[in-house]
Image (cartoon, rainbow, N blue to C red):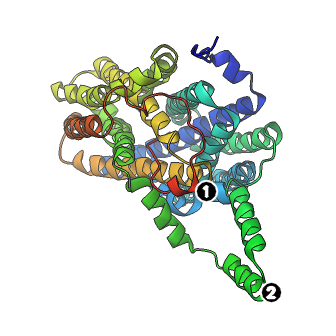
Amino acid sequence: MRGAAPPRATFREVFAVREFRAVWFSQVLSVTGDRLALVALTLLVFDRTGSPLLSGLVYASGYLPWVVGGLFLSELADRYPRRTVMVVCDAVRAVLVAIMVVPHVPVWALVALLFVATMFAPPFDSARAAITADILSGERYVLGTAITQTTFLAGQAIGAVAGGVAVAFLGVRPALAIDAATFVLSALLVGLGTRARPAAAQPEQAQSEQAQSKQAQSKQAQSKQAQSKQAQPSPLARMQAGLRLVFTDRALRTLLLFGWLVVFYTIPEGIAAPYAAGLGGGSIAAGLVIASTVVGTTIATPLFSRFVGPRRRIDLMGPLAVLTCATLVLTALRPGLAASLVIFSLSSVFGTYQLAANTAFVIRVPNERRAQAFGIASMGVIVGQGAAFVAAGAAAEVLTPAAVIAIGGALGTVVALVLTLRWRRVSPPGGRHAAGRRPEPAPASRSVPLRESG
């Protein structure tokens, strides 16, 4: 019937897409293995040194490499076929982690290898996020995003608990061997389960070259065009163009900062070992603390995406962001382990607002710039988290871990309130960008100002 709303997509329809299943399962393997290895190394260092700062530094080593990978490597997923980028990144990480399994490798070398391996995570994740938008469209894409976010969080939770158990019963190197195997399986899934696609920037470049050749009326003009094609912008220039894409629009800036609020409410992850130790717990308790910071979002995200409409999701984004951070202030009361797990889980439930920010981000990003935009957004999240973990670890040398978490939650609450007020000014409730459906491709003249947070 004309004018009737299209039927809402279902999770079954999304999982019926073969390519999405392959990309999704590769993410399950990579995220779970990564978190298992990172938690195992962090607990190993805290067990040997007893220092919250050093354990925070090790945990941050799984995050800070994103400043390199996010800025300089993420654009590879736009310039080269995204399937190829994902497979190569998995292969490189499998080799690096396999080296970590070799006996008698010192702890500092394990951390250094982890640092290098993590640099290949941004181009992989950017390619995965971008290729998901190629595979799914409309409300299917929104549900697909909810699935991938839930998978990421579930993988973190499972990997955190598995890391604690591995340190307690198996040791660090078996955990690293499992991590290496997950990369190999992930590469096989992506390589065999998704179809080949050309680089996203290639069609636009080909059209531009065709237009230039048609306009050329002489050999001299053709020669000049050939010379201009050879002149490629430097990586620094491309990075600057990506940053302009992100920060030149007020609404997109605000959405990006909503995404970066995760820096405040994931502080419990970075100091989980000293926090658990202060409550009389060991490595398993620390793993439970880390898992509790994501388990609520893991459960709530698919429900939020399925039962809350697109416009309502956008309208709830600000209030939920405030509650995500404000809940952590309750740790100032110095709760026990069980109550702490409830507080962290409740905070993570409110963290479902990230789905709204992510979706709003995607609808503004042109396809040929999507992977770079995702890379910059992810880089900000990961680097911010790494810096926050180091700062929290240093603060926990002086203050109690509970006080550090409460202070971080209070700061995040203030920032979230400011962003909520700003968002109401740049995008009133029920505005034109509230819907979760992706728009038609934007013309080239609109490429630069478009972008959002993920």
Q: Return the residue nearer the eye: 2 or 127.
A: 2
Q: Is residue 130 left or right of residue 417?
A: right
Q: Return the residue nearer the eye: 232 or 446.
A: 446
Q: Is residue 394 visible?
A: yes
| Quadrant in which the N terminus is drawn | top right
Residue 130: horizontal and vertical position, in percent?
A: 62, 44
Density class for disc 2 (Cα within 10 Å; few <14, some 14-19, many ≥20) is: few
Q: Which mark is residue 58?
A: none
Determine whether 224 is above or below 428 in the image.
below
- On the image, numbered disc 1 is attached to which residue? 104
Determine whether 374 is above or below 344 in the image.
below
Of discs 1 and 2, which sits in the foreground? 2
Q: Return the residue nearer the eye: 113 or 313.
A: 313
Q: Which mark is residue 219?
A: 2
Distance CA(mark 1)–CA(mark 2): 64 Å
Q: Residue at x 38, y 37 (%)?
A: 269
Q: Residue at x 44, y 48 (%)?
A: 382
Residue 349: horizontal and vertical position, in percent?
A: 38, 22
Determine whether 67 is above or below 337 in the image.
below
Q: Is residue 218 left or right of residue 146?
A: right
Residue 98: horizontal and vertical position, in percent?
A: 69, 52
Q: Is tag 1's residue or tag 2's residue first in the polypeptide sequence?
A: 1
Q: Residue furthest bottom?
A: 220
Q: Residue at x 77, y 66 (%)?
A: 210
Density class for disc 1 (Cα within 10 Å; few <14, some 14-19, many ≥20) is: few
The amino acid marked with disc number 1 is His
Asked which secondary structure carries label 2, the reply is: helix
Residue 319 sits in quarter: top left
Q: Is residue 396 left or right of residue 16?
A: left
